[in-house]
Amino acid sequence: MARAATADRATLKAQREKKLAAVLGVIFIALLAIEGPKTMKLLQAKPAAPIVAASAVAATTSAAVAAAPTASSALIAAVQQTVAAGQLRTFTRFASKDPFKAQVSVAAVAASSGTPTAKAASTAPKAVKIPPPPPPTSAVISVNGELGAVALDSDFPTAGTVFSRIGAVFHLVALTRTTAKVTINGGSYASGAPALTLTVGKPVTLQNTADGTRYTLLLEPPSVQAPATVTTTTPAAPASVVPSSP
């Protein structure tokens, strides 16, 4: 009896499993019929090549890729990126330039426009040379305090006490604005010098060795005008210049 009951339970269990397998098979076939075409389309579809944006929007592209699922990010990374026509591939930075420094020279602009450059603007003006004043042709020389105008290469004095007593003792041979060279008519200097040089404002006293007569000569500044008649001034202290003859 016990064996018969055990056999009946095994038979019932086998029948239930067969019925369950049949029902599951029908459900599987139904699901395969519905989802099969969709799965085949997904497997056969090729992923489109992604568009690579310019480097200026690289931060936006990175944020979008980070927000996508992990599988999509791996798929995009596996596909080689291409650049479409009109899109930026690479870029470089230009060297910075000083905005206050002239980039074009004046000579280059003048050469391109055909206009000659102005040399006068680039060169400093030259100083105007003023010619020296001409040398004087006459001077005012006092003899023993008497002023008189003396022309170059002429004898003096021509008036006054010395002239009335002895005559024109001296001769003017050379003249500048500050000096005068004087010789002795009919005589020479005891030092053997051919002429005596007078300097403006410095009196020189000569002495005649024959009679002891003294002559004080003084070259006056150019601003002094000779009077129409001989004017007597105070003679200066004597100097140690002695003529050998009157």
Image: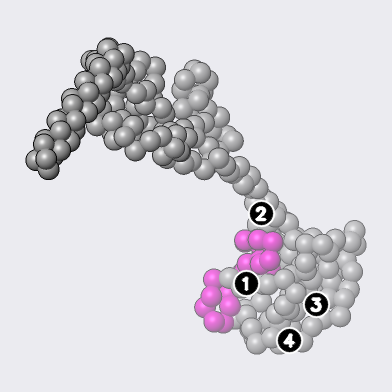
Residue 90 coordinates in the image, percent (x, y):
35, 30
Q: Split into 4 quadrants, where in the image is the N terminus?
A: top left
Identity of the residue furthest to the left in this view: 3
Give the mark, 2 or 4, whose residue is nearer the N terminus: 2
Give the mark, 3 or 2, whose residue is nearer the N terminus: 2
The residue wearing badge 3 is: 144
Tell me whether the residue at label 3 lies in contact with that at label 2, contact meaning CB atoms closer than 8 angstroms. Answer: no
The residue wearing badge 4 is: 238
**Would you identify the image quadrant in which residue 100 lies?**
top right
Mark nearest the camera among 2 and 4 is 2
Give the mark, 1 or 2, whose residue is nearer the N terminus: 2
Q: What range is drawn magenta here?
A: 170-194
- Three-letter amino acid code at disc 1? Thr
- Three-letter amino acid code at disc 2? Pro
**Would you identify the image quadrant in which residue 231 lies?**
bottom right
Magenta-span inclusion, residue 182: yes
Q: Nearer the viewer, residue 134 or 241?
A: 134
Tell me whether the residue at label 1 lies in contact with that at label 3, contact meaning CB atoms closer than 8 angstroms. Answer: no
Real-space Cα distance between discs 3 and 4?
10 Å
Mark nearest the camera among 1 and 2 is 2
